[in-house]
Image (cartoon, rainbow, N blue to C red):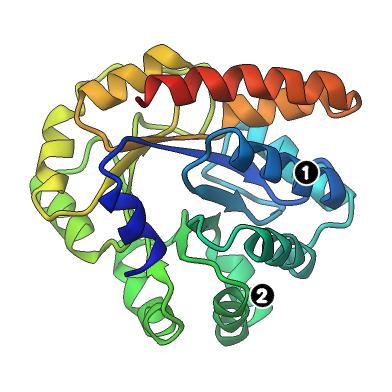
Amino acid sequence: MNRYEKLKTNNKKVFIPFVTLGDPNPELSFEIIQFLIQNGADALELGLPFSDPVADGVVIQDANQRALKANTFTKDAFRIIEKIRSKYPEIPIGLLSYCNLATGFGVDQFFKELSRIGVDSILFADLPIEMGDFFNYHFSKNNISKVLLAPPNADHSTLEYIAKNSEGYIYLVGRSGVTGVNLKTTIDLSSNISELKKFGIPVYQGFGISGKKDVEKAIESGADGVIVGSAIVKIIAENFSNKDDLFTNLKGLVCEIKSATF
């Protein structure tokens, strides 16, 4: 049983924070990830610093720039993951990344390294469904789960394809557009979630989740959990020069969101 399957057996709603590895620098990034785990994260979604994160809004874009300016490149990000995995062997670790980083690193070596350091899943935000077969060999060979995005406007056949081809979990996109906290979900996703869950894989909703009400709405719609990125990264951006303020404000948000999953 892999780590996502173990998480599923807990039969509880899941809180997954997202941060960019190396934001604002490798040392503080490691501390922030530990803090998120110690304060209720059920799994992690981590971003590799990238100059062109097209699926992300300005908050995550800026996080990528901070990490790159702090000289956190792909190999440096891998070292942070390795430290996290060494200290927390049971928590599922997923990457939300981009195909260019894998091809630039070398696809074969990219997957080998992620398998070696204990990454459980990868979601390539810019991977068209039609190109999935190119990477399938590496996912399977390295025992890494392939997570697919389910857009809010997907038709029945697309949702069925996503559910049949996702492993670990399905990332349900709560609304159209890029990541961010300012735009909220305005459409009813319950029918999409119901369609996806027919295939027995957990559905975690992200994009626009920034507080207790968002979490409650997602769970009422049938989601098995939530992924929270921009709201957390915004706190990092506003407070990284003062660690006391940073961790105080992070704890406030994390506790609010975690309490809504019970």
Sequence-wise, the earlier of marks 2 and 1 is 1
Question: Toward which corner of the image does residue 203 lie, by quadrant?
Answer: top left
Q: Residue furthest top?
A: 213
What residue do we see at 63% from left, 63% from top? 85
Marks 2 and 1, Cα distance to the nearest angstrom?
28 Å
Number of marks drawn: 2
Q: Which residue is mark 2?
A: 104
Q: Residue 162: x and y, percent?
A: 22, 57
Residue 202 badge: none
Q: Is residue 20 left or right of residue 223?
A: right
Q: Residue 100: x and y, percent?
A: 60, 67
Residue toward you, 117 or 174: 117
What residue do we see at 54% from left, 67% from top? 119
Residue toward you, 87 or 120: 87
Q: Is residue 113 left or right of residue 178?
A: right
What residue do we see at 8% from left, 49% from top? 198
What residue do we see at 76% from left, 49% from top? 30
Query: Which quarter of the image is occupied by the C terminus?
Result: top left
Rendered view: 175 above or below 117: above
Rendered view: 102 above or below 83: below
Residue toward you, 136 or 87: 87
Query: Which quarter of the image is occupied by the N terminus?
Result: bottom left
Rendered view: 156 above or below 136: above
Q: Which residue is mark 1?
A: 31
Q: Residue 115: x and y, percent?
A: 54, 77
Task: Decide: few, some or many residues near mark 1? Use Cα within 10 Å; few <14, some 14-19, many ≥20.
Answer: few
| Mark 1 element type | helix
Three-letter code, disc 1: Glu
| Mark 2 element type | helix
